[in-house]
Image: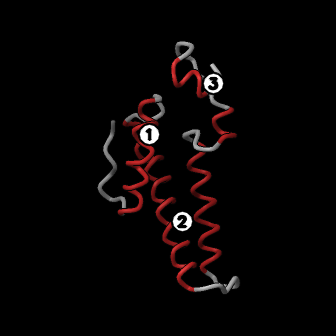
Amino acid sequence: MPPPPEFLDAYAVEEWNRIAPELHRLGLLTVLDVAPLAAYCQSFAMWRTAGEAFNAAGEDKENPLLTSVYRAADKLLKHGIRFGLTPAARARIVYQGPRGGRFGDLLGG
């Protein structure tokens, strides 16, 4: 399994370590996929950081940090779709491998 790139911050590495093993096990992560997954993980880190800053600022719903939270979430979802990290994205994956097993079951095989 590819290790997380050294340039990722702590939250991004935490997310990499959470999802990369399963993506690799499913055959959805190779050395060719490091940059797109790093972009997803960094978007996750920005979303989490922006959300924490917004929450710490209090209940002001006009806070400009809210725009940062939404933008980061949008990027997070766009990158995550590439790896089947949403239910709709998983529904579009066509699995060409053997039937059965955990991966086949996950994708309706």
Label 2 element class: helix
Q: Nearer the viewer, mark 2 or mark 1?
A: 2
Looking at the figure, which quarter contains the C terminus?
top right
Residue 47, numbered label: 2
Reading the image, the residue beneath label 1 is 33
- What's the residue at 33%, 39% (across, down)? 2
Relative to 41, say whether 65 is above or below.
below
Question: Where in the figure is residue 94, as x and y percent of width and height?
Answer: 63, 24
Relative to 96, say whether 5 is above or below.
below
Relative to 90, say whether 16 is above or below.
below
Q: Nearer the viewer, mark 1 or mark 3?
A: 3
Q: Residues within 10 Å of mark 2 (few under 14, many from 20)?
A: many
Label 1 element class: helix
Q: Residues within 10 Å of mark 3 (few under 14, many from 20)?
A: few
- What's the residue at 57%, 47% (across, down)? 80
Q: CA distance from mark 1 to mark 3?
A: 18 Å
Label 3 element class: loop
Q: CA distance from mark 2 to mark 3?
A: 30 Å
Residue 103, numbered label: none
The disc, 2 or 3, on the residue closer to the chain's N-terminal end is 2
Question: Where in the figure is residue 4, as x and y percent of width and height?
Answer: 34, 49
| Contact check, label 2 and label 3, Cβ < 8 Å | no
The image quarter containing residue 93 is top right
The disc, 2 or 1, on the residue closer to the chain's N-terminal end is 1
Reading the image, the residue beneath label 3 is 94
The image quarter containing residue 85 is top right
Give the residue furthest to the top.
98
Dot 3 amino acid type:
Val
The disc, 1 or 3, on the residue closer to the chain's N-terminal end is 1
